[in-house]
Image (spheres, coloured by chain):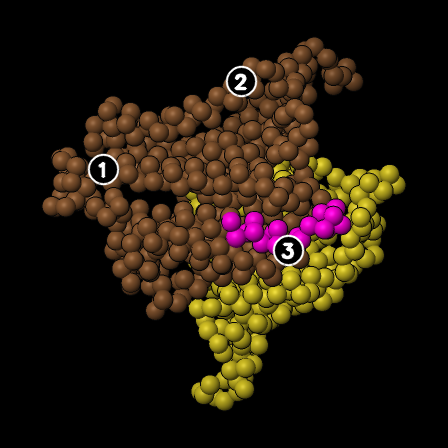
Amino acid sequence: MATTNKNDDGFNWAFALKEAAFAAIITAGLSFPILALRTDMDISNKLILNQRWSWLIVAAVLVFVGRLAVLSYAARPKSTRAASTAPQSDSSKFIAKWISAVGLLALFLFPIVVTSALGGQGALKWINNYGVQIMIYIMLGWGLNIVVGLAGLLDLGYVAFYAVGAYAYALLSTHYGLSFWICLPLAGILAATWGVILGFPVLRLRGDYLAIVTLAFGEIIRIVLINWVDFSGGYAGVSSIPRITFFGLPFNDNVGSFSNFFGLTYSPIHRTIFLFYLILCLALLTNYVTMRLRRLPVGRAWEALREDEIACRSLGINTTSTKLTAFALGAMFAGFAGSFFAVRQGFVSPESFTFLESATILAIVVLGGMGSQIGVAIAAVVLIGGTELLRELEWTKQIFGQDFDPAQYRSLIFGAAMVIMMIWKPRGIVSTREPSIFLKEKKSVSGDLVAEGHG
Amino acid sequence: MEVFLQQLINGLTLGSIYGLIAIGYTMVFGIIGMVNFAHGDVFMLSSFIGLIIYVAITQLLGLSSPMFAFLLALAASMVLTSLWNWSIERVAYRPLRGSFRLAPLISAIGMSIFLSNFVQVVQGPRSKSINGILSGTFNFGADGGFGVSLPYSSIVIFFVTVILLAIFWYIVQRTPLGRAQRACEQDRKMASLLGIDVDATISITFVMGAALAAVAGCLYLLKYGSVNFADGFLPGVKAFTAAVLGGIGSLPGAVIGGLLIGLIEVFWSYYISTDYKDVAAFSILAVTLIFLPSGILGRPEVEKV
């Protein structure tokens, strides 16, 4: 047929329209009961139906347009496509080199700039909701990157170690009055111990099975935290955890406080800024340790293990201890982050350590590009910052009505982003990797050449 | 004794539902070697579709017989859930065939999060309940005393599971479609060289899994009368446990595994602790994967270098 012949130069409209119409019809079929008929409870607790066929039409039209856009994107002329997949040019290498330096500088200046621009009250929200929140996830992402990106062990229960760290600080400080600076290393050690305990039995598993077992362990820890009320307070969690102090100087209005000692007027933003720099230092510590370890024998063994486990074993690498160190180190950084989380919130409960949290951290690592430190940081900024921004979209209420809440779409968009990212760029935002050892000249390689481990 | 029998009935009912979901896991894992993480959410979605159609039939069309309305809702849910799972495979998994190994799993996790939140957004976060579809029971034991009650719904659920297992087992073992599926399971490239449409076979596998999940979803509604957007995760993990316990790739294994998980969960709740019943399921999952990865009826996996 003449109409379906692929024309190299032009865009095949007949084919694309047919495809898009097909997708729209399927969407209409999919959304017919679940979208068009909403069930609600009436006063007598009986289910009634609200009909809203307009939603179905909107969904079908959106899919039609989306499918058309995807097809036209895929049918771009070949020249532009070749350019986008060409090997890295010198300029992009230059950008990659500078982006980390500029990013780091921006992070250090962030609280100062925001405070001077917005003043005390306005800046508090930005530093706390964006700065500190994103930095926690960057740190968790870097920690998980050791396990997933370097050693190639897919861990779906990473949040369990985060929980161990958080509860370690919460319980040690409320029961024994230990300060944050003593609890921080203790939380790291405890989490690393749990990493070894949970890591040991699962070492013989590979791939998807390993992922599912780590998920099971993560859920077991959460269920125990919920139900062992004497120990952890159950659903209510642990509250009134001592707040952070500036190396012994509390952040409050009294004599002997931080502001009093330095002769400043008291403002709650001091604590937030201090928390920001604290988590920044912790995250940079994670990054530094990871980068150094990559050059040590153990780090090279991780990467070798990821590439080929059988070859590793034949070359005499002890796979058990190699995997365990990856698990333990990843867990230790999660423990640090957890302990920071507890001191920042002043309250911990099992609600904060659900599977969705593990999936979020994993998504950050995968979307950033497994094994790439800068990619993980960018992904954390985009994902966490993006979902936080949804809370700011108050103006959408003007369009969609008062009961429209953009924040409830957070997880929905998040799940869809994971799927789309896998299809579009499975190797992540940063799709080149820096080898840790090289011959003569240091070259970036494509992420496609890097194995993802056997579990 | 009465208590034991009663728990046995409850366990077999719950286990049958897990078994039906587990068949979907086991078939998909068998054919493309991927944990279809979103399958539990497909089950939840099918339950919602069944509920909405049931309410629509009884209220908008005014059908008075609840059982007939339920059967119609079941049929509609099976068709629509199959369409959903077909689309999910087409959109989220098929483009990733041949990509790196973790990609489909991560995509499936994303799909699982998407589905549960989609249902939360469009249908609201509250549990939806209906009752009175099939409420009768047989009562045994002492009159007025503490007897054993056998609800009609439990009998229906158990026999539907056994019959569906027989039908699907026949399809997989004795029909050309089943032969194609088993061929793809062994070697996809060779199967396609021998003229099997691998993509179509995989699509049909997803459709079959979704149809069974829809039956499980509607029977769940029949038995427990309420469904919530978050109800996909735990039954999904437990059904996956059942599939692993029974031996991945084996249909009777999936149902046997499901029944075992159901029984263990119910007896654990009664005799040990209700609070820790999910710990039981998760521990079985971990112990099975570590010590018995090929399951009860599965074949051991041979690793080739």
Chain to which mark 1 belongs: A
Display colour for chain A: brown
**Location of residue B159 in the rendering, given as x and y in whole percent from the top left corner:** 65, 68
Measured in 3D between alpha carbons, the distance from the residue under mark 1 to the one under mark 2, in whole angstroms, is 37 Å
Q: Is residue A320 magenta?
A: yes
Neighbour tally class for label 1: few under 14, some 14-19, many 20 plus, Cα within 10 Å: some
**Location of residue A135 in the rendering, given as x and y in whole percent from the top left corner:** 39, 37
Tell me the SS state at disc 2.
Answer: helix
**Location of residue A434 in the rendering, given as x and y in whole percent from the top left corner:** 60, 30
Q: Is residue B19 visible?
A: no
What residue does disc 2 label?
A94
Q: Is residue A445 magenta?
A: no
Viewer-nearest of discs 1 and 3: 3
What residue does disc 1 label?
A270
Q: Residue at x 55, y 26 (%)?
A: A66
Q: Is residue A22 left or right of residue A408?
A: right
A386 to B212, vertically: above or below:
above
Q: Amino acid at mark 1?
A: His
What range of the chain is rendered magenta?
A311-329
Neighbour tally class for label 3: few under 14, some 14-19, many 20 plus, Cα within 10 Å: few
Q: Residue furthest right?
A: B194
Measured in 3D between alpha carbons, the distance from the residue under mark 1 to the one under mark 3, in whole angstroms, is 46 Å
Q: Which residue occupies the foreground of this view, A293 or A356?
A: A293
Chain to which mark 3 belongs: A
